[in-house]
Amino acid sequence: MSRKFKSKVCRLLVAALVFGSISSAEWSMKISAGDMQNEIRQISATEGETATEPEAGSKEQATQEEQSPEETITEQITGETESTEDFSTEATTEETSGETTTAEMTTGEPTTEPTTEPTTEEPTTKKKIKWNGKVVAGATMKGIDVSHHNGNINWKKVAKTDVDYAIIRCGYGNNSRSQDDAKWERNVKGCEDNGIPFGVYIYSYATTEAMAKSEAKHVLRLVKGHQMNFPIYYDMEDPIQVRLSAAKRKQIADTFLQIISSSGYECSIYANKNWWINYIPSLADIVQAKWLAEYNPVCTYQGSYDMWQCTSTEKIDGIYGGVDLDFWYGEVRTRDYNIYRQTTVKKLKKLTIKKVKTGKKTATVQWSGRKNAIAYQVQYSRYKKFKNSLKKTTTSKKIQIKKLKRKKKYYFRVRCYRYKKTSRLYSSWSKAVRKKIK
C-alpha cells in the first residue's frame, strides 16, 4: 500500500469521525482490500478501548485524551513503531495500568452502606467454663475439692490456673481434734493468701442424732474466724449409714443442717447420684445448694443441683496427682461473698393433733407439721398430767405406738423442735387427746 493512498484513507476517516457521516464500523465494511481491512479494524478496536479508559488514568493517557481525534489516529498509524505486535503490547500496557488505577481508587471508597451498629461482638458478662475443651452448659465457675490426701498444695500456682474456687475438708466424724483434717489450716491459709474463694465439707460417720450434733460442733469449731464464700457441706455416703432407715438418715441430716443454719451459715448436703435417688430422696428438694457427685462426661441426674463433681483425676498445676473437679451453677462468688448471716431463731408454734386412730394394743397419732421443724416428739401416758410418760421421736408427721395396754385410756400430745446454735428449741406441747385402746 502506497504512502499516498494511506494518507488519503486517514483524511477520509478523520472527516467521517468529525462530521458523523459514517461510523468506523461502517467504514471498515466498505473497504475490500484485505490488508487495509485488517489495519482499519485494528484502529477501530483501539479507539473503542481508549473510550472505556477510566478518568483517573495515568498522566500519559490523560494527555492523549486531550489531543484531537486526527492527531490521535495519526500518532497510532505513523508512530515510531509500525509493528502490529508492538501496538497491541502498548494497548495492553495502558489497559493494565488503567485497571490498576481503578482498583487503587476503589479501595478508598466504602463498599457497603455505613451502619451505626457495632462491627464487633458485644462483650459478654458470663465466662465460658470449659472441661476437656468443651463448654460445660450452665456452669458459672470451675472448682476443686481437696483434703489431706492431696498433700501439700501450692496454692500460688493453683491461683494462676483456671480454677475459680475450692471446697476444703475440715475433718471427719465427731468433734475431736484427732479427726481434724491434717491439711485444713494450710489449705485455708493458701486460699486466703491467694484470693481463692472457698467452702467447707466434713465427712460424716453419724448413725445417731447425737453424732450428727457432734459433727456440727466439729465444723463450727474449725470455721470460726474464717470468712467462707461457699456453703458448709455435710458429706453423706459412708456404708455404715446405708444400713439406717430412711427416716433415721433424714433425722441425722436435719440435725446437722439445723445446727449449722441456726448458727448463721449457709449449708447443704454432698452425696453421689445413687444416694440422692435411693437413700436421701426426701432431702433432695429442701436443701440449699445441693452438691452432686457423678463421674461422667455429662451429668445425667434429673433433679436440681447447684454443684457437680465430675471426676477425681483432674490434673491441676500446683497439686500432685489427681484432684476432684467441680462445677458451680449459681451466681459467681468472690472472696468478698460471705455465707454467714446473723440469724434470729424463733420458737416454733404449737402443733395440733389431727387424729388418733387406735387398734389392738396400738395407737396411730397424726398431726399438722411445721416447715422449719427438724423433728417431732410424741409423749403418751395413762395419766392426764403425763406421769410416767414415754416419748418417741420422728421426722414424719405421724407415728404408730405399739405395746399399749388393752382396754386402757391413754393421753397423747406432740411438740416439735429445731436448733438454736447447738441447743434444741422446742415448741409448746399440743393439746392432749385421750383415746381408749382396743
Image (tube, rainbow, N blue to C red):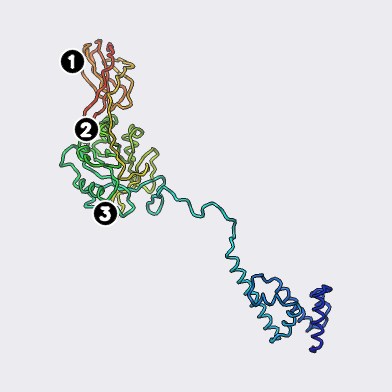
Q: What amino acid does circle 1 point to?
A: Asn
Question: Badge 1 local density, few (<14 within 10 Å), some, or many (20+)?
Answer: few
Mark 3 vs 2, N-terminal side: 3
Label drawn at residue 213: 2
Which quarter of the picture shows residue 84? bottom right
Most foreground residue, 331 or 436: 331
Residue 143 position, x and y percent, is 32, 48
Residue 120 position, x and y percent, is 49, 54
| CB atoms of marks 3 and 1 within 8 Å | no
Mark 3 vs 1, N-terminal side: 3
Residue beneath label 1, please?
388
Q: Residue at x 69, y 82 (%)?
A: 87
Q: Secondary structure at mark 2?
A: helix
Q: What amino acid does circle 3 point to?
A: Lys
Q: Residue at x 75, y 76 (%)?
A: 44
Q: Residue at x 64, y 70 (%)?
A: 56
Which quarter of the picture shows residue 348? top left
Most foreground residue, 26 or 162: 26
For marks 3 and 2, give the one nearer the viewer. 3
Residue beneath label 3, please?
156
Q: What amino acid does circle 2 point to?
A: Lys
Question: Badge 2 local density, few (<14 within 10 Å), some, or many (20+)?
Answer: many
Residue 363 position, x and y percent, is 28, 17
